[in-house]
Amino acid sequence: MLIFEQSKANRFNRAQQPGEAVDLNKIPTEFRRQQSAEMPAVSELQAVRHYTRLSQKNFSIDTHFYPLGSCTMKYNPRACNSLAMQANFLGHHPLTPASHGQGFLQCVYELQEILKEATGMKGVSMQPMAGAQGEFAGLAMIRAYHDTRGDEGRTEILCPDAAHGTNPATAIMCGYTVCEIPTGDDGDVDLEALKAVVGPQTAGIMLTNPSTLGVFDRNIKEIANVVHAAGGLLYYDGANLNAILGKVKPGDMGFDVIHINLHKTFSTPHGGGGPGSGPVGVGERLLPFMPVPVVAKTDSNYRWLTEKDAPQSIGRLSANMGNSGIVLRAYIYARMLGREGMERVADYATLNANYLMVKLIEAGFEVALPERRATHEFIVTLKKLTKETGVSAMDVAKRLLDYGYHAPTTYFPLIVPECLLIEPTETESKEEIDGFVAALLAVKQEAYEDPDKVKSAPHTLPVKRLDDVRAARKPDLRWQATEKQKG
Amino acid sequence: MSNTPNELFYTQSHEWVRIEDDGSVTVGISEHAQALLGDMVFIELPEIDSELDVGQDCAVIESVKAASDIYSPVAGTVIAINEALEDAPETINSDAYGEGWIFKLQPASLSDVRELMSAEEYSALITEDED
């Protein structure tokens, strides 16, 4: 039931009312609404119950194993949240003079330094407000670099066919055309195909390593050489950084620019509208173009560097210093881990993924690249199951919900048929992973014995199988009161 | 086993091509491709008069599973597009080789078309795919 449907005219509660009376006369008439906003009229208790019930219907890290591949749905320690929520942080106004905000600036500066060290880059800017903006900033810097050198005619960005959809989308946003590079049968980028398409039109390549196929591209050095020799730059999509944290640095692989999804690797909120943060790191060549402001340290003083200090900067991406509350959470997480902790993140993310992969192979599941070691995630293909029973990867995903597991990513990457992309992350226990294997096995057995049960899942959730075709063709996104509900 | 009409030509990327009496060609996606993609929800058609190279991405179809590019099977000029698909992309699911056609090309050379895969070759390819 929607909260609007519980609404009764003239019912109200004080909890949601403004603390002070608002004088409407101060708002010019043309900006005042002429009709009621038709907010739900419910009691405080009704509102509390409604939202508590809704939260209980959710699948979340706090309630369920959530092996959503390529999303790194790991547990965010509560401490990151509570420390960042201290009153002195919350009360810090973005326009406070640097001399009065040294503590906050120190946190940002130290996080910049930690991320530089962890990624092997020469500079880091915490400016981008989310991963997508980080990608945009990265390509904008690549463009600025070529433009500054008068190197016109570099109009093309290369993307492997296993790339996240955001990569080609970013390239188009930045005014480039996209050239797709195929993946070889072994899961690495097809080097010969790459060599055939690089040239004077190549502005750069966007790569995720480890890739979305869950393998580390062994030819990364050669890819870097080929692209650099053609005059292009290398962009690292930090989506899968969790797998290599503290082990391998994108800077050492030859990347010129990187964005980091703090929510995947550094314990900031996943989804739900964020807020996000997508810091960018750059190598020597792109250092002058970094988005500002960034924090610099002179002796023991911290200050903001602005356009005045970095005249070639691509500029600002937000009014102030990015999503500062999110930056703080990542800083706290990074400090709690320390250097050794970061290595353990990669160790256990990889161990959990490989343990789960081997258990599933033993249970008779087919993985996409069985001869390769998984990094932090791997792909199961249900092609055989679909052919023999008619039960699809999507059906299996829905049925897993009945068993109390959030489904893995389905139908991505697109190049593997009927696939589940599974990423357990480092924060899950062996028992949890074993339970997931048992559930997948049970669903597989059901697919042979009672396929309709799987095809019509979920059966135990408040919302049953959604009509995703109708939802996509005729989206109905707005609630409208009927005359009766208007009272 | 998917239907692959004998009179059509096929590509590795699952487009089909029919040579019309006037020397133009009609392009769509195979029944196998629509089955893999699932229910179609959106299509972006090429522009009339656009000049296409062989293998150039020229249209996008989106299903509940994925968005996929459509590639031009041969070089040529777009002379017609199936606008009815914009309101009813599901026609590709129900009639891939008929009402579900996507666009028509005036090909640079008809011999390019004849070099594409035959129904027999394409059937072999997708059988291999399915195993």
Image: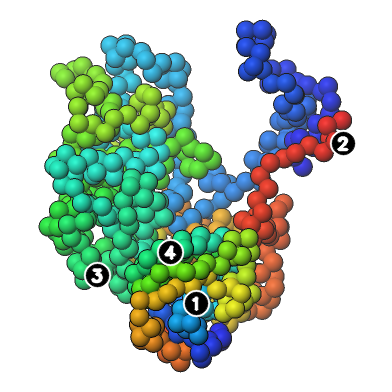
Residue B19 lies, in percent from the top left, at 47, 83
Q: In this image, A98 relative to B128: left or right?
A: left
CB contact under 8 Å: marks 1 and 2? no
Q: Secondary structure at mark 3?
A: helix
**Residue type, mark 1 in image:** Thr
Q: Which mark is residue A69?
A: none
Q: Which mark is residue B26?
A: 1
Near-viewer residue (A321 or B15) = B15
Sequence-first disc among 1 and 4: 1
Residue in view at x 37 percent, y 46 percent: A173
The reply to whether label 4 and label 3 mark residues of one chain is no
- Look at mark 2 in the image and give the residue it sits on: A484
How many other residues sit within 10 Å of disc 3, few (<14), some (14-19) or many (≥20)? some
**Quadrant assignment, res A479:** top right
Q: How is the image coloured?
A: rainbow
Q: Secondary structure at mark 1?
A: strand
Q: CA distance from mark 3 to mark 2?
A: 64 Å
Q: CA distance from mark 1 to mark 2?
A: 53 Å
Nearest to viewer (mark 1 / mark 2): 1
Sequence-first disc among 3 and 2: 3
- Look at mark 4 in the image and give the residue it sits on: B49
